[in-house]
Amino acid sequence: MHQSEHNWKTCRNDLLLEVNNHYDLYENMTGIGGANKLRYRLSFFQYGTAPEDRWMIFPDMGHVVASTYNVVVVLLSQLQCLTFLPLHSRPPSSDKIRVLGIGLVNGDHFVQVDLKACSPMPPIANYWFKFRWEEAKEWETLFSVQIEAFKAIIGSDVATAESFDVD
């Protein structure tokens, strides 16, 4: 990724291509009409503030971002913490694996969070286990130590399971 904030059009287009190219995968994952809702949210390319119905929200976009850029996405907020893994690709060599930390600030704004190597990581989003392709299976064990460390320190008031609400 490592794109500036000014490349938002390219990012939205990349994510839209991912959903279009793997439409059935996202439709099965999000339910009837869910892939179209993802496409609707991503199909906003005008300058200025996007209307709320076009915001890229999490956890809905977690798998899309991870799969588009072949990165690990770590979502951190006071209410929900999840790790998203690519759905349909093998992991690169360990020195090439990228982890993108995303934090929710003030309930409506996402910021990039720089995570140190071997930082505790939230559990893998449960839909990954159900919908990932066989090629992606290798991702599962790469972060098991960090995930166990996270589970040991997180409170029970933080959700570590995902749900989809793409309305």
Image (spheres, rainbow, N blue to C red):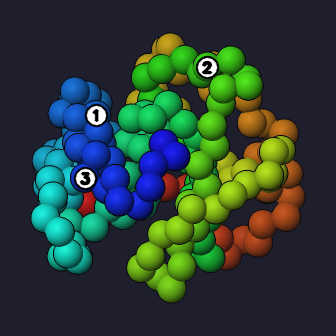
The residue at 39%/35% (across/down) is: 68
Compare residues 12 and 79 and report the one nearer the observer: 12
Q: Is residue 87 above or below residue 7?
A: above
Q: Secondary structure at mark 1?
A: helix
Q: Which mark is residue 92?
A: 2
Q: Secondary structure at mark 2?
A: loop
Could you say where residue 61 lies in the image, as x and y percent from the top left? 37, 52
Amino acid identity at mark 1: Glu
Looking at the image, residue 53 sits to the left or right of residue 112; the answer is: left
Could you say where residue 137 lies in the image, as x and y percent from the top left? 58, 20
Quadrant location of residue 18? top left
Q: Is residue 76 above or below residue 28?
A: below
The residue at 74%/36% (across/down) is: 143
Mark 2 and mark 1 residues within 8 Å of each other at the beta carbon: no
Compare residues 18 and 31 and report the one nearer the observer: 18
Amino acid identity at mark 3: Lys
User: The C terminus appears in which quarter of the rendering?
Assistant: bottom left
Instruction: Identify the mark nearer the N-term, 3 or 2.
Output: 3
Quadrant location of residue 91? top right
Category of crowding for the residue at label 1, using alpha-carbon neighbours closer than 10 angstroms: few (below 14), some (14–19), many (at least 20): some
Does residue 30 show up? no
Mark 3 and mark 2 residues within 8 Å of each other at the beta carbon: no
Residue picked out by circle 1: 18
Looking at the image, residue 10 sits to the left or right of residue 145; the answer is: left
Q: Secondary structure at mark 3?
A: helix
The residue at 68%/53% (across/down) is: 122
Could you say where residue 57 lies in the image, as x and y percent from the top left? 36, 63
The residue at 54%/36% (across/down) is: 71
Residue picked out by circle 3: 9
Q: How many marks?
A: 3
